[in-house]
Amino acid sequence: MNFFRKLLGLGPKELVNVRPKKHSSQIKRTETIDNLSDIEHRKIYPTLLSQKTVTFDLVNELVAVMHERDGLFANIVIGHVMVDEKDLEDGKPAVYQVRTSDKNEEDYKTLRLTGEINLDALEIPFVDWNYSDSKLNFKVLSCPITQFSSEKILSKKHLQEAHEKLAADELLVSIPRKGLIFVCSKNISDEDYGNFLNMHAGIVLQENEDLEFLCEDIFVVKNGEIENCIGIPQLSEILKEKR
């Protein structure tokens, strides 16, 4: 970590307000679902996954690639999960992976559209978030750590909320690990950008078995949609060396 800070000229800020979940819902795999309309008390949601995931089985799965670039440690893909709202565990619904390998394109389209509607309807509000032990010079938004917090980056509705809260036309969005999301205005000083990048890198590189690695790059959002990404090849190389 010290090597990375020196490489980018980052300061020695420490993360104090980023904590893992107390309880982690176990992913339970299911057989292929043939008729989605027959699933009672359950909802379909998209889920973001690194292709190096150890929680999900992506062999032969139909997935959409959300993010890829040359030298990336692992592509980010969109799978789907099913939440059983009646089967609660520690106050949280059980989550099941939806197997899609035998589905045709129309079935997958139904799955995707259903997931998008349900994601938009989720109530996971953004809140002001200070991840350091000192006052920040800029505003950062995050939200409670949940199964679908990182997925807010897929929802124009949720990202428009961030635009409004930050009064910013362009956003920087970090989704370093599953269940986490951090958002700030793109219009910040170089020092503040370095601070945000330092936070992002620290979470990417920390050892955390509760929160699975997701993405080392940072996304640029405009009008509620991903417009570009800021690739961080230094982080990719460190991740490759560590694995």
Image (cartoon, grey):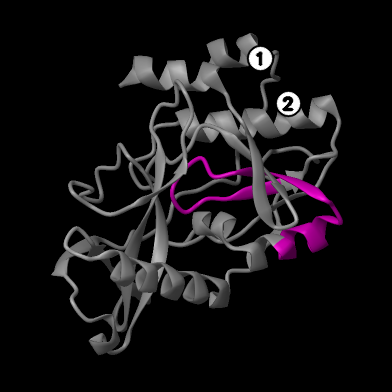
Q: Please, what is the three-letter code of the amino acid marked with disc 1? A: Leu
Identify the residue at image location x=73%, y=65%: 161
Q: Which mark is residue 194?
A: 2
To which residue does mark 1 refer? Answer: 8
Q: Is residue 168 magenta?
A: yes
Q: Residue 101's spot in the image, x, y percent?
A: 19, 58
**Is 152 placed left or right of 9 in the picture?**
left
Helix, strand or loop at disc 2?
A: helix
Comes first in the chain, label 2 or label 1: 1
Q: Quadrant of residue 12?
A: top right
Front in this rendered view, residue 105 or 195: 105
The Cα–Cα distance between marks 2 and 1, rounded to whole angstroms, is 8 Å
Residue 14 in view of the camera: no
Q: Residue 147 is drawn in which quadrant?
A: bottom left
Residue 102 placement (x, y as % from top left): 16, 62
Q: Which residue is more in the foreground, 199 or 188?
A: 188
For image coordinates 41% across by 63% down, the residue present is 46
Q: Which residues are magenta?
A: 160-183
> Is the Cβ of the residue at disc 2 closer than 8 Å to that at disc 1?
yes
